[in-house]
Every structure is written in C-alpha cells, then in structure tokens.
Amino acid sequence: MISCDLCGYPSRRVWPPSSKCPKFQQVESKNWMTLAACPSCDVRWVGVGWEPYASFEYWVPWEHSDNQWNAEIDDGEGRRIHKWHHEQLKTNEDTLTAEDLADVAVHRARNYGRDPFNAI
Ligand SMILES: [Zn+2]
C-alpha cells in the first residue's frame, strides 16, 4: 500500500503538534477528543490535546469505523479512548522522525518537561 501524500498513512503512525500536520477535517468531537478525516485519503485520525491549554494536539490513525468511535467515546467519559490514544503514541514512539522529535521537544519545553512519551 502506498502511503498517503498528505497524512502519510499507513507508514506514518503519529502526528505530533507541528506546522506540517495536515489540516484534518473534523468528523466528531467529544470528551476533548476529535475524530477527523484526512482530506486526501479519508483515513480517520484521532486527536488529543495536551497541556498547556490542550493546545498541543497529537494524532494517531483510527482504523475502525466512525460507529465504533461513537460507541466507545462515551465509555467512562472517553477514558478508554484517551488511554488507547496514549498507548498508541508510546507504542509508535520509534516511528517519529527527527523533525517530529524536534516538535515534541518544543512541546516538552512548554509543558515543564512532560510530553506523551515520558508521561505515565
Ligand atoms: Zn491521508
């Protein structure tokens, strides 16, 4: 499968907060999380904003249906998907490019040394 020119799916597994991150089109937003579509390939991505002010958004692909997202997003006020999202980030940390790591470092500096990859 050839990766999408815009979002990089399926080889790209994480978009950190970056000016290079595609402008995903919102499908649903609930419990501080967003389900959005790549405007080029229509693959779904889930975004979660990290402090400060939830302004540092990390995205991972959602490889299930929109219905599945809707069924799970209310579970425990979204805690299940929130936990899944964080696990996806950690699992795919080794896929981050040097540029991605620089973006994560910017976030970490703004967030008192915390980023999704060193947070418990
Ligand atoms: Zn795409």
Image (tube, rainbow, N blue to C red):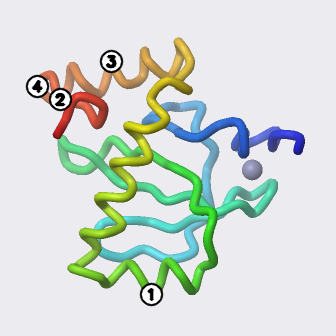
Q: Residue at x 16, y 40 (%)?
A: 120
Query: Is disc 4 in contact with disc 2, using a CB cutoff of under 8 Å?
Result: yes
**Above or below 23: residue 108:** above
Residue 51 placement (x, y as % from top left): 20, 43
Query: Is disc 1 in contact with disc 4, using a CB cutoff of under 8 Å?
Result: no
Query: Is disc 2 in contact with disc 3, using a CB cutoff of under 8 Å?
Result: no
**What residue type is disc 4 on?**
Tyr
Helix, strand or loop at mark 1? helix
Mark 1 close to ligand 1, CB under 8 Å: no
Helix, strand or loop at mark 3? helix
The residue that disc 1 covers is 71
- The alpha-carbon separation of the residues under discs 2 and 3 comes to 9 Å
Residue 111 placement (x, y as % from top left): 16, 30
- The alpha-carbon separation of the residues under discs 2 and 1 comes to 31 Å
Residue 113 placement (x, y as % from top left): 15, 22
**What residue type is disc 2 on?**
Arg
Specify the quadrant that holds the N terminus.
top right
Q: Closer to the camera: disc 1 or disc 4?
A: 1
- Mark number for residue 105? 3
Q: Which residue is drawn at 56% across and 26% down?
A: 95
Q: How many labels does the image show?
A: 4
Comes first in the chain, label 2 or label 3: 3
The residue that disc 2 covers is 114
Outermost residue to the front: 91
Comes first in the chain, label 2 or label 1: 1
Q: Which residue is drawn at 31% across and 61% down?
A: 82
The residue that disc 4 covers is 112
